[in-house]
Image (cartoon, rainbow, N blue to C red):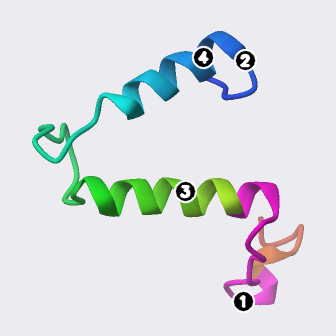
Amino acid sequence: MKNILNEKDYSEIRDRIKNLSGASIRRWGKMDLQQMLVHCTTQLKLAVGEIPSKTQGPSFMRSGLGK
């Protein structure tokens, strides 16, 4: 699995993103290029804490017993 903390992987991922265009053919899913980039950016911001996450689901499912 690729890791953005690994410089080689990061460069490869960055180059793939730079090569995207509106004419790029999606390989799966229904999102267009803009929607996909917003989705990925939001997920990364959540991961690093730039966007606060909200607790979701019933409390039972978040407990050790529920998992």
> Residue 9, how many percent across, how many down?
60, 16
Q: Which residue is mark 2?
A: 6
- Choose the circle earlier in sequence order: 1 or 4: 4
Tell me if mark 3 has few (under 14), some (14-19) or many (20+) residues whose alpha carbon lies within 10 angstroms of its own.
few
Q: Is residue 35 magenta?
A: no
Q: Are the residues flagged by discs 4 and 2 in contact, CB closer than 8 Å?
A: yes
Element type at marker 3?
Answer: helix
> How many angstroms separate mark 3 from mark 2 (CA)?
18 Å
| Residue 14: assigned label | none
Q: Which residue is mark 1?
A: 58
Instruction: Please tell me which residue is depicted at 21% across the width and 58% down the height of the picture.
Output: 32
From the viewer's side, name the closer residue of 67 and 34.
Answer: 34
Instruction: Please tell me which residue is depicted at 78% across the width and 77% down the height of the picture.
Output: 52
Considering every residue shown, the one lying at the far top of the view is: 8
From which residue to which does the magenta span run?
Answer: 46-60
- Choose the circle earlier in sequence order: 3 or 2: 2
The amino acid type, in three-letter code, at marker 3 is Thr
Magenta residues: mostly which secondary structure? loop
In this view, 25 is above or below 34:
above
> Residue 30, how many percent across, how many down?
19, 59
How many numbered callouts? Answer: 4
- Choose the circle earlier in sequence order: 1 or 2: 2
Drawn side of residue 47 relative to residue 25, left or right: right
Q: Are the residues flagged by discs 1 and 2 in contact, CB closer than 8 Å?
A: no
- Choose the circle earlier in sequence order: 4 or 3: 4
In this view, 16 is above or below 53:
above
From the viewer's side, name the closer residue of 58 and 42.
Answer: 42
Q: Which residue is mark 3?
A: 41
